Structures are given as C-alpha cells and as structure tokens.
Image: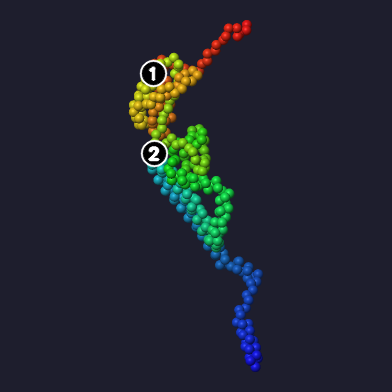
C-alpha cells in the first residue's frame, strides 16, 4: 500500500514539472532577418557610430586646445635671446607637453571607442598587459629611449636652444620629446638622436665658454713682445664687448707647442655661452690687422732642402 502511494506521488511530481516547464523557444531564420532589418537595430548602430565620431572629435579638439595653449605660451618668449633660460624652458615644455598629450589622449580615446562597440575593455586590458610583457622584450630599445628621455628632461641637462656635441657632430637642439631629440647642425642637417643613445654629450650653453685663439709666430720672433701685443689686443677687445665677456682681462698661455714652421702661442677669455665662435673670429681678425701693422710675422709652412755635394748628377 505504501509503495503504491509513493509511486502515485512520483507521477504527480513528474506531471507538474512537465506542465510548468517553459516551452523551448526556437528562432527561425525569418526571425533573424526581421531582427537585422528592424528599425531598432539601425538606431543602435547609428548611436554607436555617432558616439565613436564624438569621441574622436573631442580627442582631436582636446589636442588642438593643448597645442594652441602651449604655442601661445611659447610665443611670449619668441623675441628673447636664443639662450635665455625662460625661452629655453618654454620651448622644452612645449614640445614635451605636445608629445606626451598624444601618447595619453589617443590611447584613452581608443579604449572609449572599444567600449562603445560593447567590447569588454577589462578583459582586453588584461590581455594587453600580458602581451605587453612579450612586446617589451622585443622593444627594449624603445622602452629604454622613453625612460632615458624622461630622466633627461627632469635632470635639466639639455634644453631647446642649447648647443651640444654628440660624438663628432655639433648643433643646436630644436626639439626634445619623450623618445627623440632633434639637433640641427650648422650645415642644416637635422640629427635624430634617440634619448637612450644620448649618454655622453657636451653642452656649451651652460655657465660659460672660452674663446680660444692659437697664433703661430716665427721662430726668430721675440715671444715676450708678441705676448704683450696679444695682451693689448685682448684687453681692447674685452673693453669693446663687455656684454659678451665674463672676465676683465684675457688669459695668455704663452708657448703651447713647437710646430714645423712656427711657435704656437695661445690667448683665451671667458664669454657667455654660445658667443665663443663669433668672439674667436673677431679676435683672429684683430690679431691679423695688428700683427701686419706691427710687422709681426705669421709664418707659412716652409721646408729647407740641403743638397750634398755630388748628390746631383749632371
């Protein structure tokens, strides 16, 4: 009797589950076509595209505003001297902010565009984080350049407008970015120097520079007399260029070497950064004019040939 009751209850439970189970929904091809061609689908696609266009437009406007602001700030110092600290700082920060803004704004805009297309950005970022490790090993040079550029900018060892020497090349810094530094040589060539490669370089735009002029005199000339003339020339030049010079008298270094046809003496003086080349040219001109008027001989290369008797046959 008990067994029959349990069987009856099991049948009732099965019947209830069959009647309460929701019927399975089957989607026909016609239904799929209707969903694709429905007005709501087109509206959703249109809103997504409009959102993407708006994101890209706002990103472009933001970069444009940053460029205008930095350009307006840099133009305040356009009339300043080439080595004016405020002008150098303005040009350096201008290039840095512009390049950094592009590195930040466009990746954020890309993430927002992906979100507009209902793409799981969190999963994508996690995947990108793993992939970046693999890419990092293959792009070690790029990462090194970026890190070196950041430290170089914060150290303040170089600025736009500085005259630097990279290896055997010398030029003026025109642009400093996070990864790349552009140096313009005197002949117009533009050097592209990765920041990671700028390890050892010379900067003649910090503190002071020396204008150095070497003069060759004949071996028969009175060196003491020549040094007095050079001292007078140097003092006169400094007196007429007080705005460039940082000293009141020249440095006379007497005899620097014995060349084949001349004795080499040197005169030098400290000037403001970037003015040493013009000072050297001007000093050489003054020395030539004074030496000509004083009768001081600047020898040219010459060679004495001794012929032994009987060495030349008739």
Task: Answer with left or right where residue 32 lies relative to residue 54.
Answer: right
Q: In the image, what residue occupies the spot 41% across and 18% down?
A: 223
Can you say whether 14 is above or below 59 in the image?
A: below
Say whether residue 5 is visible.
yes
Find disc 1 in the rendering and name its residue.
Answer: 224
Q: Quadrant of residue 131?
A: bottom right
Asked if residue 8 shows in the view, the reply is: no
Work out how far the residue at label 1 is from the one at label 2, CA to CA, in angstroms. Answer: 41 Å
Residue 86 falls left or right of residue 185: left
- Disc 2 packing (10 Å; few <14; some 14–19; many ≥20): few
Depicted 212 relative to depicted 120: above or below = above
Query: Dot 1: what SS?
Result: helix
Q: Nearer the viewer, residue 30 or 304?
A: 304
Q: Which residue: 39% across, 34% down?
A: 208
Q: Which mark is residue 37?
A: none
Image location of residue 173, percent across then percent down: 46, 39
Q: Quadrant of the C terminus?
A: top right
What residue occupies the far bottom of the structure in this picture?
A: 1
Which residue is identified by label 2?
A: 84
């Amino acid at each position: 009797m008990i067994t029959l009751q349990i069987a009856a209850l099991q049948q009732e439970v099965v019947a209830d589950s069959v009647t309460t189970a929701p019927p399975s929904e089957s989607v026909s091809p016609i239904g799929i076509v209707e969903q694709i061609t429905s007005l709501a689908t087109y509206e959703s696609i249109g809103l997504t595209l409009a959102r993407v266009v708006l994101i890209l437009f706002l990103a472009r406007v933001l970069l444009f505003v940053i460029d205008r602001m930095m350009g307006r700030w840099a133009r305040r110092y356009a009339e300043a001297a080439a080595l004016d600290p405020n002008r150098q700082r303005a040009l350096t920060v201008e290039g840095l902010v512009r390049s950094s803004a592009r590195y930040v704004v466009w990746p954020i805009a890309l993430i927002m565009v992906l979100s507009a297309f209902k793409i799981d950005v969190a999963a994508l970022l996690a995947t990108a984080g793993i992939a970046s490790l693999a890419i990092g090993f293959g792009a070690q040079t790029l990462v090194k350049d970026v890190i070196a550029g950041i430290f170089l900018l914060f150290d303040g060892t170089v600025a736009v407008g500085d005259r630097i020497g990279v290896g055997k090349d010398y030029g003026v810094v025109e642009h400093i970015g996070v990864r790349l530094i552009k140096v313009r040589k005197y002949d117009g060539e533009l050097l592209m120097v990765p920041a990671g490669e700028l390890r050892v370089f010379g900067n003649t735009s910090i503190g002071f520079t020396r204008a150095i002029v070497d003069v060759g005199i004949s071996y028969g000339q009175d060196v003491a007399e020549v040094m007095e003339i050079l001292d007078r020339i140097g003092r006169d030049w400094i007196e007429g260029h007080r705005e460039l010079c940082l000293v009141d008298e020249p440095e006379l270094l007497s005899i620097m070497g014995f060349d084949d046809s001349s004795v080499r003496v040197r005169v030098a003086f400290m000037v403001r950064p970037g003015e040493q080349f013009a000072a050297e040219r001007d000093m050489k001109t003054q020395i030539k004019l004074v030496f000509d008027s004083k009768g001081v001989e600047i020898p040219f290369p010459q060679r004495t040939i001794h012929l032994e008797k009987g060495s030349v046959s008739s």
